[in-house]
Image: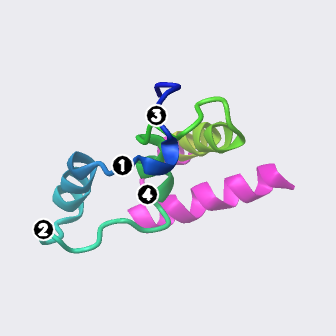
Amino acid sequence: MSQDVNPLHIQWKNPEFFAYLAAQKGVAPGASVLDESNAMEYFATSPFYDRHSNNEHVRMQSAVHFAQAAATAPQSMADLARETARRNEQELR
């Protein structure tokens, strides 16, 4: 971001990401597509997101846990999300 631009005056949104999520979920255009499973992915596309933050570290760990859970056995998406959340919680302990 430019040093001469006040970030308080910047608005940001990513309509392409919303369109991608809507197509992926089969949601009608204009309907809400953000939820707890994709909010961090959306925020990570923002120019305000710090790639060196703790959020990024946790996001990358979640991606690894998701891949590990997906590789272990075929499951439904709900089971896969629960297994990923369980692995994330274990790591935080």
Label 4 – label 1 distance at C-alpha? 17 Å
Q: Is residue 61 found left or right of 31 in the rendered image?
A: right
Q: Earlier in the sequence, mark 1 or mark 3?
A: 3
Q: Evaluate if marks 4 and 1 touch, with contact meaning CB atoms under 8 Å apart.
A: no
Label 2 – label 3 distance at C-alpha? 33 Å
Tag nearer the camera, 2 or 1: 1
Give the residue at mark 1. Answer: 12
Label 4 – label 2 distance at C-alpha? 17 Å
Tag nearer the camera, 4 or 1: 1
Q: Secondary structure at mark 4?
A: loop
Give the residue at mark 4. Answer: 38
Q: Amino acid at mark 2?
A: Pro
Q: Nearer the viewer, residue 80 or 93?
A: 93
Is residue 3 positioned above or below 60 on the image? Answer: above
Q: Evaluate if marks 2 and 3 touch, with contact meaning CB atoms under 8 Å apart.
A: no
Q: Evaluate if marks 4 and 2 touch, with contact meaning CB atoms under 8 Å apart.
A: no
Label 1 – label 3 distance at C-alpha? 14 Å
Q: Nearer the viewer, residue 4 or 71?
A: 4
What residue lies at 49% left-to-right and 28% top-to-bottom?
Answer: 4
Label 3 – label 4 distance at C-alpha? 29 Å
Magenta span of residues: 69-93
Q: Secondary structure at mark 1?
A: loop
- Residue 76 seen in the current view: no
The C terminus is located in which quarter?
bottom right
